[in-house]
Image (cartoon, rainbow, N blue to C red):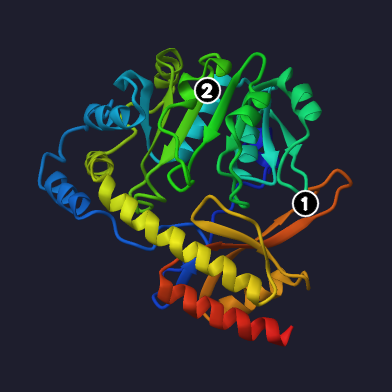
Amino acid sequence: MASVFRAAIERMAGYAPGEQPQETGWIKLNTNENPYPPSPRVVDAIRRAAEGRLNVYPDPDASGFRRVAAALFQVDPDWILPANGSDENLTIITRSFCDSGEMIGYPYPSYVLYESLAQIQGSHVVRLLLNQSWNWDSAAAADLRRQLRIFFVPNPNSPTGTLWTADQLTELLPDNGVLVLDEAYGDFPAHPHRGELLRDARFDRRLIVTRTLSKSYSLAGIRFGFSVAHPDLIAGMRKVKDSYNCDAVAIAAATAALEDQDWMLQNRARILATRDRLAAALKAVGFCVTPSETNFLWTTHPTGRHQAIYEQLKARKILVRYMKFANATADGQTLDGLRLTIGTDEEIDRLLLALTEIVASL
């Protein structure tokens, strides 16, 4: 029987999210969730929303949330577009700015969902290879700028935790397209930005920042994100989004989360302290650790037996992310390693004990 799918869908493999075991007893350090609960204000807001009028459609523009997010980024509300997780923002952007046959670029290794979005759209995707310092070649970036409609850049990057500067990012603005800063981890750097890049004239009002509440605000289970961009861009993207893309409960939770900055910042401080402790401990048992501006660490071991380490941790009901990137270098070599989410101190203690035992047996 002939396939009924579009050719682009038939060819693609699809994005594989991190494992989500449904039984209890696991230590989950594989999908960069926040180990701490959301603000009590969020729980109250969810309760009130659930007791409210769920029989009617939610505000299609999430107006209350937009006002709170706009104040945080020091912009007007018409600079904000809420979405069902930041991944929906990326989908909206892809559908808004890139036609079938046009080109999308992204640094590699990084978030491979960008490739899936390009394939779904029938667009071509181009990788800008990163070197051993996790930076790109400026000449190669200049060549890409002339071809691309969208350049997706996770900043800080995953899986490495690398943060690129505004000067570096200006090298990636397409000549005839948009630069998208996917700031899923944007609250974790030492100096998080609050709209400064959006007001930088070098980006020519063609910069889009995407944020999620899954990481720093402990709301991975709610699915809420937003884009911040010049109103001309937001107005066009609004045409593409689903009519009621954010439900009433999620809007209420997200608004309450942004309003309680103190809670988020306290959890952030705990995570960063644990991250630094984990980095030092990993080095002490022989791992190489990339400096991180996020709530995770990218680490490799001199034995190169990263998959074996992952499997032995999994056997102990500790999940980390084993990641493998094919053709990650100019000469076509494969890069692999382990991405470790920062959990609670107790979870990290169990991880370190397990890793010490596993490394000794390699």
Q: Residues within 10 Å of mark 1 (few under 14, many from 20)?
A: few
Q: Quadrant of the C terminus?
A: bottom right
Q: Secondary structure at mark 1?
A: loop
**Disc 2 to disc 1, how far (Cα)?**
29 Å
Label of residue 207 in the image? 2
Q: Earlier in the sequence, mark 2 or mark 1?
A: 2
In the rendered structure, which amino acid carries the disc numbered 2?
A: Leu
Task: Report the label total.
Answer: 2
In the rendered structure, which amino acid carries the disc numbered 1?
A: Ala
- Examine the rendering and report whether any part of residue 116 can be seen: yes
Circle 1 is placed at which residue position? Answer: 326
Residue 220 located left or right of residue 349? left
- Examine the rendering and report whether any part of residue 3 can be seen: no
**Residue plotted at (72% across, 69% down):** 301
**Residue plotted at (43% across, 17% down):** 230
Residue 17 located left or right of residue 331? left
Residue 29 at x, y = what percent?
50, 66
Residue 361 at x, y = what percent?
71, 87
Which of 4/82 is in front?
82
